[in-house]
Image: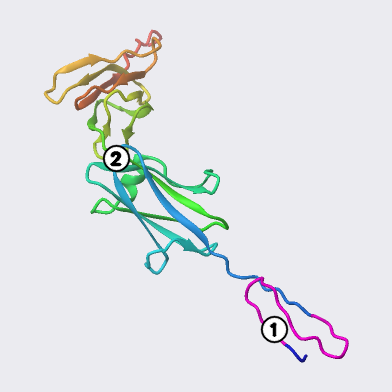
Amino acid sequence: DRDVIKQSTATDMSFEMPADNCTIHITFEKGLVKYTVSTEMIGDGSGTVKLTDRGGDQIDGSVLPDEEVLVYLYPAENSYPSKAVVLDADGNVIDTLVETYEDYLLGKEDDGSMRTGFVMPEGNCKVQVTYNIIPPLYDVKAELSGEGRIHIEESSGLLLDVTSPRKATENTEIKITATPQEGYEVISAAIYDDAGEKITDLTPATSGDTTYNYTIPAQNVTIKVTFDEKEKLPDLLG
């Protein structure tokens, strides 16, 4: 052990050969490798993104694997994050942070920002955020008369169930399913405007069915469904 050579990187090393036989011992240790993380904003809207560590310090562009990365989304006043994903170096999605407008509405703060995050992978990655301009939204209300309930779901477009009342964009196609309680039936189903004027009657796709399709216009609408007791047949044996 006449010479001890310490090197922290893989470089050429040398020593002076003694007048004796010798053995070279080399020890390898795994180093702490950081990977880069970047951000990208796309879409017809606008906004910014900030990355921090768990302690709140802004990330300078490189992170150790398995460290938590906090992602802060700051959309402009007229925009919202419609999607936020983490991409690997080949552009493949390895994590989804925001998938729908409803995800944003459920997670946003009072100032409109949203915090999410992911665990840093063992490789370079990019946080890609799609900011879109907030479209005009119209109320979709429901009024029921009698004993029964309705279920409203989106067939295409954008229908927000997390707001009260529900809201939808123009040309969103919705499916309305009316379910009367036992002994009741659907008497009428129609769409009305804010002034209480009927826009249209709802006609089921199949005769005798209580499922209706409707396309949202560029105005607020109210779905009115009336349930009534079924007519009882006379007791012929009585």
Prevalent SS, magenta region: loop
Q: Residue furthest right?
A: 21
Question: Which image quadrant: the C terminus?
Answer: top left
Q: Amino acid at mark 2?
A: Gly
Q: Is residue 79 above or below residue 18?
A: above
Q: Is residue 206 above or below residue 126?
A: above
Name the side, left or right, on which 192 lies relative to 158.
left
Which residue, given by chain and number where applicable, does mark 2 sit on?
Answer: 45
Residue 158 horizontal/vertical position (percent) = 33, 31
Which residue is found at the position 88% from the left and 86% from the top?
21
Nearest the viewer among 198 and 43 is 43
Q: Amino acid at mark 1?
A: Ile
What segment is highlighted magenta in the picture? Answer: 4-24
Nearest the viewer among 151 and 39 is 39
Which residue, given by chain and number where applicable, does mark 1 sit on?
Answer: 5
Q: Quadrant of residue 122?
A: bottom right
Q: CA distance from mark 2 to mark 1?
A: 57 Å
Residue 206 horizontal/vertical position (percent) = 40, 11
Nearest the viewer among 6 and 119 is 6
Residue 7 horizontal/vertical position (percent) = 65, 78
Crowd tier of the residue under label 2, counting other residues whose Cα lies within 10 Å: few below 14, some 14–19, many 20 or above: some
Magenta-drawn stretch contains 57: no
On residue 113, which mark appears?
Answer: none
Which residue is found at the position 14% from the left and 26% from the top?
194
